[in-house]
Amino acid sequence: MNGHIGLNEPGVSFDEDYLQTKLDDVTINVASHKYFSGDVTLTEGITVGLNKIIKAGKVIVIINHEAKKDIYHQIVNGDSHHTAIPAIYLKQFPQVNYYITKNLKG
């Protein structure tokens, strides 16, 4: 997993309110199978940018799948000014809360 928030992929500018972005290969593979049947390949998406997200009164990030265990540990142990991974970048803001499933802690 890559630590994206919405379609704010790793390496995206954190200064945008809304943006059209090229999707990371991880997101393409997961989304193409999870949300569509048949032969659909996504390459871009439109999303609310991190600049707009951090202006919210409360931000909830849910990490709820075993496949996201690595990214969870990067969030817990990572530098909050890390600019490549949006999920880590958000931890510097007090209005951001992370919720995880029990199986990710170990």
Image (cartoon, rainbow, N blue to C red):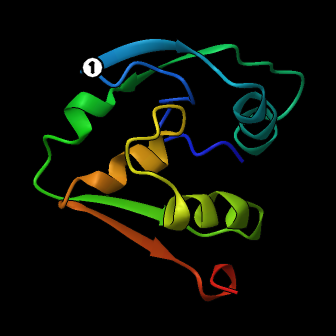
Looking at the picture, does residue 73 appear above or below residue 13? below
Q: Position of residue 74 (x, y in %)?
A: 60, 58
The front one of 60 and 87 is 87
Q: Quadrant of residue 64?
A: bottom right
Q: Secondary structure at mark 1?
A: loop
Report the residue at 39% width, 50% height from top: 80
Residue sitting at the far right? 39
The amino acid type, in three-letter code, at marker 1 is Asp
Left or right of residue 84: residue 19 = left
Q: Position of residue 31 (x, y in %)?
A: 71, 36
Q: Quadrant of residue 22?
A: top right
Looking at the picture, does residue 70 appear above or below residue 1? below
- The quadrant of the image that shows the C terminus is bottom right
The residue indicated by pointer 1 is 15
Report the residue at 38% width, 42% height from top: 81
Report the residue at 22% width, 53% height from top: 93
Q: Residues within 10 Å of mark 1 (few under 14, many from 20)?
A: few
Left or right of residue 11: residue 13 = left
The front one of 31 and 80 is 80
Looking at the picture, does residue 58 appear above or below residue 64? above
Q: Position of residue 66 (x, y in %)?
A: 75, 70
Looking at the picture, does residue 57 appear above or below residue 83? below
The mark tally for this picture is 1
The front one of 69 and 31 is 69
Left or right of residue 11: residue 103 = right
Q: Position of residue 37 (x, y in %)?
A: 82, 35
Report the residue at 58% width, 81% height from top: 101
